[in-house]
Image (cartoon, grey):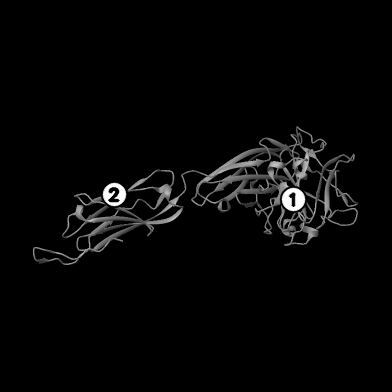
């Protein structure tokens, strides 16, 4: 670290080799980025040499070296730029070398964390103040980011002030989704809480109401009001018969009831959607071959279709095929053709969020394999939340 100097004598008196005494003050166990440089303080002394005659060096993480000096009182300082260090553990060692070449040192360790601040959290669906009919299954979606914690290490938790924790959330890559069944009637204050690895907590809240007087009755869709946004065509963790799913996105500014709509291809395969299926504005709706996440590969579902290659029923072909959504009166709401060059097995195929309309989502160049894993089965896909960009 410091070049060794030869031993000397002082007027014929032999000097017994002894290293300088070095003491380095601790800056604290945890240092935060964004707080500016901090001053490290050390003291040095030597049996023979004056403090200001000692050679001083500061070493960070056994790599970076900065040379300094001590004053007559043995004090030496160095400005440490916290923002230049990565997150995690670090060490600083202070060296002092006397004229005999003897070296003394002291070490301090600390961790660098991100800037002080909680994660940024947003509940993206449904809208604040939304009202649903009693017994409606509601899919809640949220996103979060943090300056210091990677997105896939954030911890998400959903809770209703009336019914308590909402269990079964699937969270990954800064996104979270939970399907809430059986919420009690009345107004719920829904909170999404996100905790980073440093214990900082951020949250967002909305209110939803389950009541008989739903203000905006769902109406029929017009062409393009609902578009196909994502598909799992060829799952591998489970069989096609239970693992296929298709996602719809509501581009309109009003809720749409799709009960009675036909989900079909261009040939003879079709299925008439059953039960109450309301797609809220700006929200995603996942149609599954099996509604049970313990069976279908961990996919949270909003509605069911009969997966059967025979009529009635519909299967997503692993070769060229179409998916069509049609109103009860025969008006086509969205149509999409794909082939086996569009996708790879065990990965969901999704349209870029920038092209969520009935014209752009027909273009193969706007679709890509998904990267985020939002299912317990481990296959990439973002059912019920915004797709990965292409």
Give coordinates of residue 257: x percent, y percent.
80, 40
| Of pointers 1 and 2, the one earlier in the residue sequence | 2
Q: Residue 77: give its label.
A: 2
SS of the residue under disc 2: strand
Per the model, the C-alpha gap separating discs 1 and 2 is 61 Å
Is residue 143 visible to the viewer in this orientation of the structure?
yes
User: Mark 1 near mark 2, Cβ–Cβ under 8 Å?
Assistant: no
Q: Residue at x 91, y 54 (%)?
A: 311
Where is residue 123 shown, x and y percent of the image?
A: 63, 41
Q: Nearer the viewer, residue 118 or 66?
A: 66
Residue annotated with mark 1: 301
Question: Height in image: 180 above or below 344?
Answer: above
Which SS class for mark 1? loop
Mark 1 Cα shell of 10 Å, populated few (<14), some (14-19), many (≥20):
many
Rendered residue at 79%/43% (across/down): 277
Can you give x and y, in whole percent of width and height, for residue 226 in the image? 78, 41
Q: Nearer the viewer, residue 232 or 136?
A: 232
Q: Nearer the viewer, mark 1 or mark 2?
A: 2
Rendering coords of residue 73 (x, y %): 19, 50
């Amino acid at each position: 670290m410091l070049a060794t100097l030869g031993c000397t004598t002082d007027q014929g008196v032999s000097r017994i080799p002894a290293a300088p005494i070095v003491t380095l003050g601790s800056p604290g166990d945890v240092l935060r980025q964004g707080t500016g440089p901090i001053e490290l303080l050390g003291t040095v002394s030597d049996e023979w040499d004056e403090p200001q005659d000692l050679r001083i060096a500061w070493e960070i993480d056994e790599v970076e070296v900065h040379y300094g000096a001590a004053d007559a009182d043995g004090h030496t300082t160095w400005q440490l730029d916290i923002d230049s260090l990565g997150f995690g553990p670090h060490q600083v060692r202070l060296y002092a070398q006397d004229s005999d070449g003897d070296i003394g040192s002291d070490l301090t360790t600390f961790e660098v964390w991100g800037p002080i601040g909680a994660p940024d959290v947003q509940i993206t669906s449904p809208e604040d103040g939304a009202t649903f009919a009693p017994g409606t299954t509601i899919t809640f979606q949220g996103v979060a980011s943090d300056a210091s914690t990677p997105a896939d290490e954030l911890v998400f938790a959903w809770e209703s002030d009336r019914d308590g924790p909402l269990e079964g959330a699937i969270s990954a890559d800064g996104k979270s989704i939970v399907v809430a069944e059986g919420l009690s009637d009345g107004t719920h204050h829904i909170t999404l809480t996100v905790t980073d690895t440093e214990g900082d907590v951020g949250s967002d809240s909305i209110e939803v109401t389950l009541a008989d007087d739903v203000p905006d009755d769902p109406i029929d869709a017009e062409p393009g009001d609902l578009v196909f946004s994502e598909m799992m065509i060829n799952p591998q963790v489970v069989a096609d018969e239970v693992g296929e799913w298709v996602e719809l996105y509501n581009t309109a500014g009003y809720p749409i009831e799709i009960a009675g709509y036909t989900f079909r291809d261009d040939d003879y395969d079709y299925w008439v959607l059953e039960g109450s299926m309301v797609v809220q504005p700006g929200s995603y709706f996942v149609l599954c071959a099996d509604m049970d996440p313990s069976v279908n590969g961990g996919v949270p579902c909003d509605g069911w279709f009969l997966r059967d290659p025979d009529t009635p029923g519909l299967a997503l072909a692993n070769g060229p095929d179409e998916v069509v959504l049609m109103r009860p009166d025969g008006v086509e709401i969205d149509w999409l053709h794909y082939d086996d060059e569009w996708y790879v097995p065990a990965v969901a195929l999704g349209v870029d969020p920038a092209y969520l309309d009935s014209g752009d989502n027909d273009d193969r160049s706007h679709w890509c394999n998904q990267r985020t894993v939002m299912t317990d089965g481990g296959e990439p896909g973002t059912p019920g939340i915004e797709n990965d960009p292409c």
